[in-house]
Image (cartoon, helix red, strand yellow):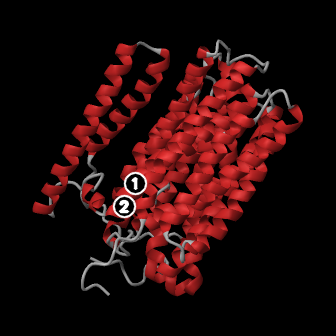
């Protein structure tokens, strides 16, 4: 079955209408929506202290505004290939933007933390489906020698939103309270809906029409993934705030659910191969991990997610609760690092077309680990050096991110068959976000543990060396995690050519 030739919304019709520039217009359209989803994932961190005070929450409950979003986003990523095949690019993308818009408005008007958390989950569900789409478009719409540049330009645009977000969000929190930060996604969602109507095709990733009567969704796999993620996150929280028995039960349950998920996905894939016209497609095609570069890239993505999202949560909390800085001042300090990140991504994006992936990713991990380790050099006894060192180490870490972001996904998936690109993008983003969801909880747990070990308090407005020591040890934990990822990053080298290959 093919779409009618007169349909002006197919991929081929839009290419004919807009010419060579169409692929860039399409990339711009999905970039705006991705900016909104990424902004909604990170900007809440600036408002966590204010929100904690408003709802009289402890730190472990307040962080669920971040980790709840991450959990929802992580699980929903696995549905992206199915949604694109069944409903096409435009319907899937526009539906996510409407849900993200509803979450932003609902969170802004919420009068209880339960409603805030529900709004964050809605935003997370939308953001999760959107996240894998740009990589699919880049790998399908751009030639191999353009993919690095496209990824760099896309990354530069996307990081400008979270780079500017904390600065604007900090000013909004200080001036209008935490509710105002929810409304920041509204103009981005409206713009993305307009662009989607003009430039995003109604077709599926293969270029053919969407098939609403296609394979069903693997609901069993989705429920297992959701339950496993929630058990993992709650188990990590229980490690610090609960009993050893409850933590062991939840983490053990997460491990069992992971095993059940893997077994189910293997059976679903075998059944689908035996009966192509029946059943459901697996949420995660485990055969992709037979490709060494994809497997190593997935490991790096998971560990990198822990460090990236853990630090995104930890840095604003450190500056406000450790150093006693205001929310607006925190945003101002982080702004230069965000701008440097945008520039670095654009430069490294061009290098990614010529330099091997393992080299760029390894350099990025080394710089990111160094930026975390060097945070321990900030001394309350030298107040004149605090802000310059904060800015310098934040910039160093963002340069490291700039080396990793445009290189990892594209490099890990280049050797996959084109028909597997939607699944590959979904899987690698899922693993990165699973690491991120765990990383946010892990940083909160380690921080609370080390604060208690040093006999300090975290919810007071005064600074103390004991509390600074606890933050320093948490940053060193993140540095060690980044160093661990280097082993897998070095294995992202191109495999040696087989005998008889050209």
Characterize the local packing of mark 2: few (<14), some (14-19) or many (20 or more) Cα atoms within 10 angstroms.
many
Percent across and percent down for residue 100 are 56, 47
Helix, strand or loop status at disc 2: helix
Q: Pick out the residue farthest to the right.
A: 384
Image quarter of residue 491: bottom left
> Quick one: 353 or 194, which is closer to the camera?
353
Percent across and percent down for residue 371 are 66, 46
Percent across and percent down for residue 275 are 11, 61
Image quarter of residue 320: top right
Q: Give the left or right position of residue 408, taking residue 397 as reference.
A: left
> Quick one: 398 or 35, which is closer to the camera?
398
Q: Is the N terminus in the top left, top right, bottom left or bottom right quadrant? A: bottom left
Characterize the local packing of mark 1: few (<14), some (14-19) or many (20 or more) Cα atoms within 10 angstroms.
many
Given contact means CB atoms under 8 Å apart, are the residues at marks 2 and 1 in contact?
A: yes
Q: Can residue 439 be seen here?
A: yes
Q: Which mark is residue 298?
A: 1
Q: Which mark is residue 294?
A: 2
Q: Give the left or right position of residue 405, taking residue 495 as reference.
A: right
């Amino acid at each position: 079955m093919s779409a009618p030739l007169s349909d002006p919304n197919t991929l081929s019709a839009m290419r004919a209408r807009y010419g060579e520039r169409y692929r860039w217009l399409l990339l711009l359209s999905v970039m705006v929506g991705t900016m909104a989803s990424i902004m909604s994932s990170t900007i809440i961190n600036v408002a966590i202290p204010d929100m904690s005070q408003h709802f009289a929450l402890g730190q472990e409950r307040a962080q669920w505004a971040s980790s709840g979003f991450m959990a929802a986003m992580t699980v929903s990523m696995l549905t992206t290939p199915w949604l694109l095949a069944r409903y096409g690019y435009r319907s899937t993308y526009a539906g996510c933007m409407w849900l993200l818009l509803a979450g932003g408005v609902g969170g802004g008007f919420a009068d209880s933390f339960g409603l805030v958390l529900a709004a964050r989950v809605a935003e997370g569900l939308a953001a999760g489906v959107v996240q894998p789409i740009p990589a699919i478009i880049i790998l399908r719409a751009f030639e191999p020698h353009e993919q690095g540049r496209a990824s760099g330009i896309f990354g530069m645009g996307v990081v400008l939103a979270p780079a500017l977000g904390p600065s604007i969000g900090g000013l909004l929190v200080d001036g209008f309270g935490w509710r105002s930060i929810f409304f920041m996604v509204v103009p981005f969602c409206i713009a993305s809906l307009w662009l989607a109507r003009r430039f995003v095709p109604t077709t599926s990733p293969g270029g053919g029409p969407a098939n609403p009567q296609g394979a069903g969704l693997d609901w069993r796999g989705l429920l297992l993934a959701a339950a496993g993620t929630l058990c993992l996150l709650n188990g990590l929280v229980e490690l610090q705030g609960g009993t050893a028995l409850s933590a062991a039960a939840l983490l053990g349950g997460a491990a069992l659910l992971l095993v059940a998920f893997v077994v189910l996905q293997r059976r679903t894939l075998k059944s689908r191969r035996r009966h192509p016209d029946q059943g459901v497609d697996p949420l995660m095609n485990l055969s992709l991990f037979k490709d060494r570069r994809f497997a190593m890239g997935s490991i790096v993505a998971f560990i990198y997610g822990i460090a990236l999202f853990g630090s995104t949560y930890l840095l604003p909390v450190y500056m406000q609760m450790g150093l006693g800085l205001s929310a607006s001042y925190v945003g101002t300090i982080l702004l230069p690092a965000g701008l440097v990140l945008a520039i670095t991504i654009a430069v490294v994006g061009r290098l990614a077309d010529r330099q091997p992936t393992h080299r760029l990713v390894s350099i990025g991990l080394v710089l990111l680990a160094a930026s975390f380790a060097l945070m321990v050099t900030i001394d309350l006894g030298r107040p004149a050096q605090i802000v310059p060192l904060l800015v310098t180490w934040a910039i160093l870490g963002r340069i490291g991110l700039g080396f990793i972001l445009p290189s990892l996904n594209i490099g890990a998936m280049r050797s996959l068959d084109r028909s597997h690109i939607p699944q590959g993008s979904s899987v690698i983003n899922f693993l990165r976000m699973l690491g991120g969801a765990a990383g946010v909880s892990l940083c909160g747990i380690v921080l609370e543990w080390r604060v208690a070990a040093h006999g300090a308090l975290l919810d007071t407005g005064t600074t103390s060396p004991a509390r600074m020591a606890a933050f320093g040890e948490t940053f060193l934990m993140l540095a060690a995690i980044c160093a661990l990822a280097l082993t897998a990053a070095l294995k992202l080298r191109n495999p040696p050519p087989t005998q008889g290959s050209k």
